[in-house]
Amino acid sequence: AQKITQTQPGMFVQEKEAVTLDCTYDTSDPSYGLFWYKQPSSGEMIFLIYQGSYDQQNATEGRYSLNFQKARKSANLVISASQLGDSAMYFCAMREGQGGKLIFGQGTELSVKP
Amino acid sequence: DSGVTQTPKHLITATGQRVTLRCSPRSGDLSVYWYQQSLDQGLQFLIQYYNGEERAKGNILERFSAQQFPDLHSELNLSSLELGDSALYFCASSVAGGGIYEQYFGPGTRLTVT
């Protein structure tokens, strides 16, 4: 079964608007972490934001925020005030328990239009 | 720049050959992870080392092996290469072996098997 599901293969957003990238996950472990990474066309993986399963508040990092809905097992990434440089692949990932390995979703390709 | 270095950046080799990919973690990070990114399999965890010891194993083929040296750099050895091994290989590092710590990715090594 898919542990991390990103249902949007591609998304378009107008520059300066907000966009939400969806991510749902599946785990029976009460302790887990959720991550978002950005992969521009150059190929590197850039860490954006982290949310722990016990965190009471949604994580925020600058223009990035994570809309964490535990009961629905969703961890959507919200990018506010989109910029042209935000055009990239975005991956949601999960770490289960106290282990370190990350399980990745298939990614969402975001295109920001001027 | 994540602080994780990987060499070489690109590698082109023939089927049946053996290659070694090298990774230096961020200063102070004890854990090294290897991931493979291919078009058909997406991003997959291969193996993790923590302070020189193997910590976790993922979908790593028997033809592949890795190690972490006393100076904490790591090498991923790929042998009897097949066309399907063509992929982007990432190394990531984190402070600890798991838990809440982010993983920072290197720029990747793009392997092409011809």
Image: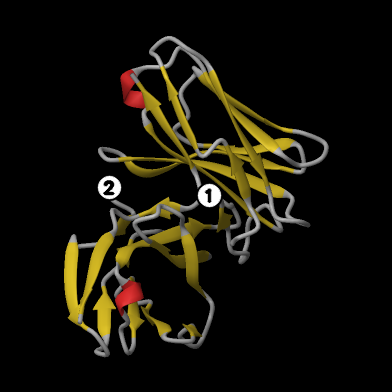
| Circle number at residue B85 | none
Same chain assignment for discs 2 and 1: yes
Q: Reply above or below: B20 against A21.
A: above
Badge 1 marks a residue whose secondary structure is loop
Q: Chain of mark 2?
A: A
| Circle number at residue A101 | 1
Q: Nearer the viewer, residue A7 or B36?
A: B36
Q: Amino acid at mark 1?
A: Lys
Q: Reply above or below: B67 against A21.
A: above
Coordinates of residue B66 in the picture (x, y in percent): 62, 28
Left or right of A105 on screen, residue A45: right
Coordinates of residue B63 in the picture (x, y in percent): 49, 17
| Circle number at residue A1 | 2
Marks 2 and 1, how far apart at CA? 17 Å
Left or right of A53 on screen, residue A78: left
Coordinates of residue A43 in the picture (x, y in percent): 40, 52
Q: Residue at x 27, y 87 (%)?
A: A18
Q: Residue at x 34, y 54 (%)?
A: A3
Residue ranking furthest to the right: B70
Q: Which quarter of the figure is the C terminus of chain B placed in?
A: top left
Q: Nearer the viewer, residue A89 or A85?
A: A85
Q: Is residue A75 visible?
A: no
Label 1: few (<14), some or many (≥20) within 10 Å?
A: many
Coordinates of residue A72 in the picture (x, y in percent): 29, 75
Q: Amino acid at mark 2?
A: Ala
Q: Chain of mark 1?
A: A
Badge 2 marks a residue whose secondary structure is loop
